[in-house]
Amino acid sequence: MSAAPEASASAGAAGAGGARVVAIDGPAGTGKSTVSKLLANRVGAQCLDTGAMYRAVTLAVLDRGVPLDDPKAIAEVMPGVDVDVLVDADGTNRVFLDGTDVSDRIRTAQVSAAVSAVSAVPAVRTTLVALQRKVSQGRFVVVEGRDVGTVVFPDAGLKVFLTATAQARAQRRHLQNLDLGQSSDYDEVLAAVNRRDHLDSTRAVSPLRAADDAVLMDTSDLTLDQVLDELTRLVQQRIGAPQ
């Protein structure tokens, strides 16, 4: 990630310091992606959507017909998967898989249903954590995901754990699907949210949990502006970023 109009990084880098990192974690449907992008814009940072990277690998697994219940087979795919992230001048993340822009394809319901199983494979996480650190190295970034504050950047300048009720998160995802022109059933989305919560919180590698020093924020009954105002205050307090 660079201050230039576009920056690019590929997997396989060393770690980076986290003093200028805002780590935003939480389960699916808490609005992490939207909040992170808007927050980064407010405080003059760049935003990195780590979930998009896991979705890209998941898409690669699905495209190759690899069984989701075979961690060994998924791990064997990783050396041949080329995931790349470009950050445009406006902060938009574009994700490429094997040289093709898959920013839209990774948002399908099929990928959403499979990403937890793929993300739980140690080889996947090892590769993508290295990529996340490389892309963020030496930059002021807002990084969102599920293990940013606990694994990727345990020394982040600010760690936030967003949460909301399963019902509130399912409703948001349901409306998001409809806005994207996808068919959506609320009950099915709620079941998927609960299933993903269970998978993410019980996986052996980097389970979903709040870092001990994270600020917990329940967004169930908060407006987007309320969330952003509080996060902006915290960034200015902990990192000293300008408004």
Image (spheres, rainbow, N blue to C red):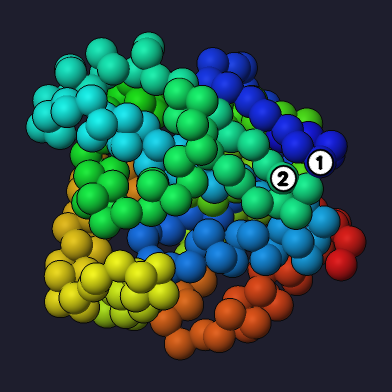
Q: Quadrant of residue 87?
A: top right
Locate residue 92, reporting x and y percent. 65, 51
Which residue is rendered at x = 40% and y = 68% of the image? 180
The image shows residue 193, relative to residue 133, as above or below, that is below
In-front residue for pair 48/18: 48
* Closer-to-camera residue (230/89): 89
Q: Residue at x 24, y 71 (%)?
A: 183
Name the spot of residue 204 as percent of width and height, x first. Answer: 24, 34
Q: Nearer the viewer, residue 98 or 203?
A: 98
Q: Which element is circle 2 on?
A: loop
Quarter of the image that includes the C terminus: bottom right
Disc 2 designates what residue? 88
**Residue beneath the point at 55% across and 85% down:** 223
- State which quarter of the image contains the N terminus: top right
- Please, which residue is most extreme toward the right here? 242
Q: Are marks 2 and 1 in contact (CB under 8 Å)?
A: yes
Assign a secondary structure to mark 1.
loop
Label 2 sits on what residue type?
Asp
148 vs 188: above or below: above
The spot of residue 115 in percent (x, y) is 28, 43
Q: Which mark is residue 5?
A: 1
Crowding at label 2, few (<14), some or many (≥20) Cα neighbours within 10 Å? Answer: some
Give the numbered dot on residue 237.
Answer: none
